[in-house]
Amino acid sequence: MPSDKSSMPAATVPVTARRNFPLHWLGVLPFLIFVTLFLIMPTMKIVLGAFQTPDGTLTLDNIRGLFTPSIMAAYWISIKISLASALLGCIIGFAMSAAIVLGGLPQWIRGPLLTFSGVASNFAGVPLAFAFLATLGPVGMLTVFLKSELGLDLRLLGFNLLSFWGLTLTYLFFQIPLMVLIITPAIDGLKREWREAAEILGATGPQYWRMVAFPILFPSLLGTLALLFANAFGAVATAIALTGSSLNIVPILLFAQIRGDVLGDPHLGYALAFGMIVITGIANTIYIWLRARSERWLK
Amino acid sequence: MKRIWAWGALIFGLLYFFLPLIGMTNFSLKMRRGEYSFDAYARVLADPKFQETFGFSVMMALFTILFGILLIVPTAYWVRLKMPGLRPYIEFITLLPLVIPAIVIVFGYIRLYNTSSWLPLTGTIMGTNVLLVFGYATLALPYMYRAVDTGLRTIDVTTLTEAAQSLGAGWVTILSRIILPNVLVAVLSGAFLTFAIVIGEFTMAALLNRPAFGPYMQLLGANRAYEPAALAVIAFGITWACMGLIQLVTRFSKHTRAQR
């Protein structure tokens, strides 16, 4: 921002005392109308609908209706898949970032890996499911290879792509690169002086990590974990293309509910969607809050 | 020791990423028994449904980009120029589509804009298409706004505006001939990302019943064996191209700036 505002002619500098203040709002009006109509109101409709009966009176019955075994099971498996893919994504992504930043690998690896992460983190949805079906599906490349060359039958070992682990493994394909993209700048921010200071004071490598680097990175790590969790929780397309409707997770259940009211109660659908907002909302609030905290150290 | 760990982590990751990519490519070439061929690609590309749905999604993406630019560039500019105090709030709003899952947003659309509502957008094909473009613009909002706002940060908005005003330029001229060219790289980055998101989007198009590329891929996946793998390769190529173009325009702009 320029600092020489005082020398500018008064005509273009907004002075609070002037009466044209409401006119300024006209500039952001189109944007505000758009987000109100196509972001806020649709969401409010769902949230309010979750607390209403079909004739409009307030009720908690819809929310109570979520606590049936089948819907609870759907939430539970969704949460488990999201948590597992977020945790593994964090660990593997962190290991890869640490490897390229601190591991003494050749410098030229870094650029291509970050570019590839940008691509892979956006390669989600239907095609991603196809890629995994072609690799780990019943006649996929890896399945066939393991069976014919090594005599390992994945199916006999209990692996099925259309299951908890199958979906987790597939989600990792966009979770790991997202972690790499977010955490690499944070690892870059670890100052060499901190390490040297710790070593001068006699700290060993693990001690430096445990008592210096990890506490500094902790908000970033936990925040990214929350972001990855929300990312996986809202994913619909990959799950539907991969499993059809054979796996009972919340996004698939909601999709079927919107298509054909499978729950037999439209307002239970609102409650289902409201539950999704609450869960991704909590996760994202954690992310935003922790990111603000972590930026204090990493400037 | 440290280096062994580093190589181990990297190779593990790369193996994980490349196996599915190799798997899908390999599978897409195996349609003819016993030899590699491009039959699956030929079959997909010749499918009139493919051409229709792909064309539809490209159109939707272009309209989304156009609408996004028209909506976001003036807003971000205006906020920077006249209402900097509003910036945190606008930024918060633009992040909301990351918090609210797309399936919930489109659920709201269906309930809010159905045939018996005050704005019956889903009643006509045209209306539904418009609604879909708005939905995509909402999904792209976090990326587009951030890209444009970052671009605006690198130029001196106030001085440029005042210089243009003293030469007699109106708001439209300032936006289209001063601001937009200066943030073009940022706008293009946002546009390519939007394209990558919209082209294969499934949830919104499927629930609004529009013949887009995403639902077509899903349908083909449920009924065919080799064609989906070919589609996955094509989709990966498109994503890769979009990201490559972003890198390219960014590098290009750095180059021109360094020459000055």
Image: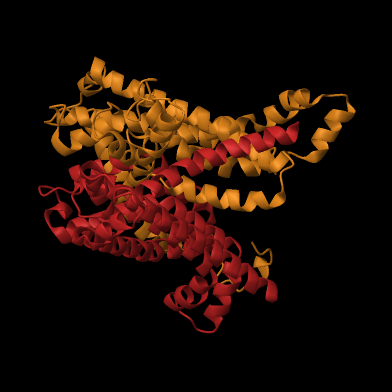
Image quarter for residue B259? Answer: bottom right
Coloring applied to the structure: by chain
Q: Residue at x 72, y 23 (%)?
A: A210
In the depicted view, which residue is nearer to us: A282 or B246? B246
Image quarter for residue B99? Answer: top left
In the depicted view, which residue is nearer to us: B11 or B197? B11
Q: Vertical placement of A120 versus A146: above or below? A: below
Residue B219, horizontal then vertical, whole percent:
22, 46
**Which image quarter holds the C terminus of chain A?**
top right
Chain rendered red: B
Q: Residue at x 16, y 52 (%)?
A: B122
Q: Is residue B191 left or right of residue B228?
A: right
Q: Vertical placement of B190 versus A93: above or below? A: below
Does the image show residue B155?
no
Does the image show residue B4?
yes
In the depicted view, which residue is nearer to us: B186 or B246? B246
Q: Is residue A123 left or right of residue B126?
A: right
Residue A197, horizontal then vertical, whole percent:
85, 32
Q: Vertical placement of A247 versus A25: above or below? A: above
Q: Residue at x 38, y 31 (%)?
A: A167
Q: Residue furthest bottom?
A: B167
In the depicted view, which residue is nearer to us: B231 or B106? B231
Q: Is residue B233 left or right of residue A245?
A: right
Image quarter for residue B196? Answer: bottom left
Chain rendered orange: A
Residue B166, horizontal then vertical, whole percent:
55, 81
Residue B66, horizontal then vertical, whole percent:
36, 66
